[in-house]
Amino acid sequence: MTLKAWTGVSIILFFVSVALLAPYLAPYDPNEIVNLPYEQPSRLHLLGTDRLGRDIFSQLIYGTRLSLLIGVLTGVFMTTISTFIGMISGYYGGIVDRILSTITDVFLVIPGIPLMIVISSYMRVRSFWTVILVIAFTSWGGGARIVRAQMLSIKNREFVLAAKTIGEKNWRIIFFEILPNMLSLIASNFFSAVLYAIIGEASLSFLGLGDVSKISWGTMLYWAQSANALLNRMWLWVLAPGLSIVMLGTAFALLNFSLDEMTNPRLRRR
């Protein structure tokens, strides 16, 4: 593994450990009023308290759970959709390819974040799953286009033609012969999807389009903005979740770059 990969894995493992050990690491319950509002950072409250007197450091630790969970689950959904559509489109070609490519192009042309905002604003029920489904549904196009291009270059190789010659069914060729040869590309798409999902969740929650009753890094930014945290000199209330988003996003980006280097001969030689 490269230095980029080790760095990315180390950061991700750190945040995963924080999420799993949140009840033991957080000094207070994140929803408990433990002091006066807008307390400045101190030994008792490392990041101060919010407008209700709740400990911000405890919220940051517990927020790691939801932000990380939304990022991973959304990444799984996005990668599954893009992989399925990209592989079917590239393998069958013809009318199937034209229809699926047109649908993919529509989602590529429409900007992702504005589309998420429009759809979320019309959702009557705003929940944990709503955010996941909205991000996944609007953001799979790029991955599908990449998978389709790879499928077009693989489907005419010798092992695929041999499988067709002996009479294997198409679904078996796609998922048992071709898919294993695309795992590195799919993994790269997954890391990109998780990175996009973390930013997307923070954006929607910051605008109040997520479930603001739950604690995540995005909802922390929403309540900080609503409470005029900067005007009240609560800089860390904004900086801590923002920096956490940047660090976790950087970790997935580093993994993505290192995977490209390991699987791309040209990058590996450089």
Image (spheres, rainbow, N blue to C red):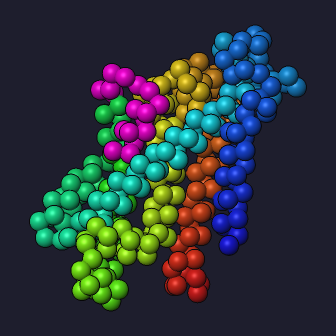
- Look at the image and tell me in which quarter the C terminus lies: bottom right
Apparent side of residue 154 relative to residue 93 in the rendered image (left or right): right
Give the image location of residue 266, x and y in percent: 51, 85
Residue at x 52%, y 45% (from the top left corner): 71
Apparent side of residue 56 relative to residue 179 in the rendered image (left or right): right
Residue at x 51%, y 23% (from the top left corner): 212
Q: Is residue 121 above or below residue 132?
A: above
Give the image location of residue 64, x and y in percent: 64, 37
**Which residue extends farthest right?**
43
Residue 186 seen:
yes
Which range is magenta? Answer: 121-137
Q: Is residue 158 above or below residue 88?
A: below
Please say whether residue 83 is one of the residues in the magenta stretch. Answer: no
Secondary structure mostly seen in the magenta stretch: helix
**Which residue extends farthest left?**
95
Residue at x 47%, y 69% (from the top left corner): 183
Q: Nearer the viewer, residue 30 or 242?
A: 30
Q: In this view, does 252 lie above or below 151?
A: above
